[in-house]
Image (cartoon, rainbow, N blue to C red):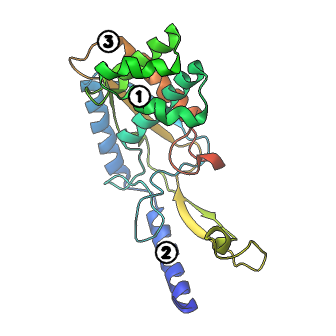
């Protein structure tokens, strides 16, 4: 693409981002939040709210016309899908179990796959980690909460949505050595920076989270433990993109 084409594309992206960052319809969010509350109450879910500790970027990896994705709800506000909420809780629980087993980070994938096995295969496969009684109990709890390949977990996760409407921030990342990272050249000051703008949820924005227990599933008392895992994951692992740079943490 020519330099003129690059400038035109950049100008169009900036214009689109400015429109996308505007405050969503407060009435639409209010109605959606009321339905969310009615649903979670009907399911007897445990609910809680947390605020963003700094900026939060849901859905950055989604393919869009802007080349940089963002997790918009169909009504125009940012949200965290239930599948991602579950993943955060499960990852924190996995780290707790790995700590009890004194596993290195390289063994986490093996542990993760083992936890998902069917009952008839799990006990034998889990023994390779030489688990203590405490680790065995935690693994059993995780399988009941999150499920296995054989059976759905008892915990039901809901989309996390903001409790009020707000405009988004426009942030920027500015990679300087694209040819080097692409394996085409050595790093050097002669490379041109490539500023990329993207959307982000601002600091101190409140989101509502909810988790219920599946009807008919055993051990409903484990719902409290699952909520604790989720809260710890949101506070210590973060959600969305660029968590290693401080984005996505809640408080």
| Residue position marked by numbered label 3 in the rendering | 219
* Residue 13: mark in rendering: 2
First along the sequence among labels 3 and 1: 1
On the image, the x and y values in percent for residue 195 come to 63, 71
Q: Where on the picture, by quarter, is residue 82?
A: top left
The answer to whether one can see residue 251 in this image is no
Q: Give the side of residue 122 with respect to residue 61, left or right.
A: left
Residue at image coords 48%, 62%: 21
> Relative to 198, is 246 above or below?
above
**What residue do we see at 53% from left, 16% from top?**
130
Circles 2, 3 touching at the beta carbon (< 8 Å)? no
Label 2 close to label 1 by CB (< 8 Å): no
- For the residues labelled 3 and 1, the Cα–Cα distance comes to 22 Å
Q: Residue furthest right?
A: 189
Near mark 2 (Cα within 10 A), the count class, few <14, some 14-19 or many ≥20, is some
What whole-number distance in Å separates the C-alpha atoms at marks 2 and 3?
50 Å
Q: Is 153 placed above or below 57 here?
A: above
Residue on which disc 1 sits: 114
Question: Closer to the camera: disc 2 or disc 3?
Answer: 3
Asked which quadrant contains residue 209, the reply is: top left
User: Considering only order in the chain, which callout, 1 or 2, is on the residue closer to the N terminus?
Assistant: 2
Q: Tag 1's secondary structure?
A: helix
The residue depicted at 32 percent of the width and 28 percent of the height is 148
Is 122 positioned to the left or the right of 228 in the image? left
Residue for point 54% across, 48% down: 56
Is residue 186 toward the left or the right of residue 63 in the image?
right
Comparing 101 with 25, the one in front is 101
């Amino acid at each position: 693409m020519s330099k003129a084409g690059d400038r035109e594309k950049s100008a169009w992206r900036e214009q689109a981002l400015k429109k996308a960052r505007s405050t969503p319809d407060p009435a639409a969010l209010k109605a959606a939040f009321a339905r969310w509350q009615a649903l979670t109450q009907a399911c007897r879910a445990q609910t809680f709210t947390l605020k963003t500790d700094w900026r939060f970027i849901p859905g950055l990896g989604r393919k869009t016309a802007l080349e940089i994705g963002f997790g918009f709800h169909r009504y125009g506000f940012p949200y965290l899908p239930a599948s991602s909420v579950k993943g955060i809780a499960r990852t924190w629980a996995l780290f707790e179990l790995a700590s009890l087993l004194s596993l290195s980070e390289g063994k986490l994938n093996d542990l993760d796959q083992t936890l998902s096995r069917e009952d008839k295969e799990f006990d034998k496969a889990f023994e390779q980690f030489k688990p203590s009684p405490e680790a065995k109990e935690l693994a059993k709890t995780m399988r009941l909460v999150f499920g296995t390949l054989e059976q759905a977990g008892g915990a039901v996760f809901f989309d996390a949505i903001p409790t009020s409407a707000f405009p988004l921030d426009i942030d920027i990342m500015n990679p300087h050595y694209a040819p080097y990272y692409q394996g085409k050249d050595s790093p050097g000051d002669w490379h041109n920076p490539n500023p990329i703008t993207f959307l982000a949820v601002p600091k101190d924005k409140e989101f509502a989270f909810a988790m219920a227990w599946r009807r008919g599933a055993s051990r409903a008392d484990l719902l409290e433990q699952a909520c604790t895992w989720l809260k710890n994951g949101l506070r210590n692992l973060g959600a969305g993109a660029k968590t290693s740079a401080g984005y996505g943490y809640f408080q």
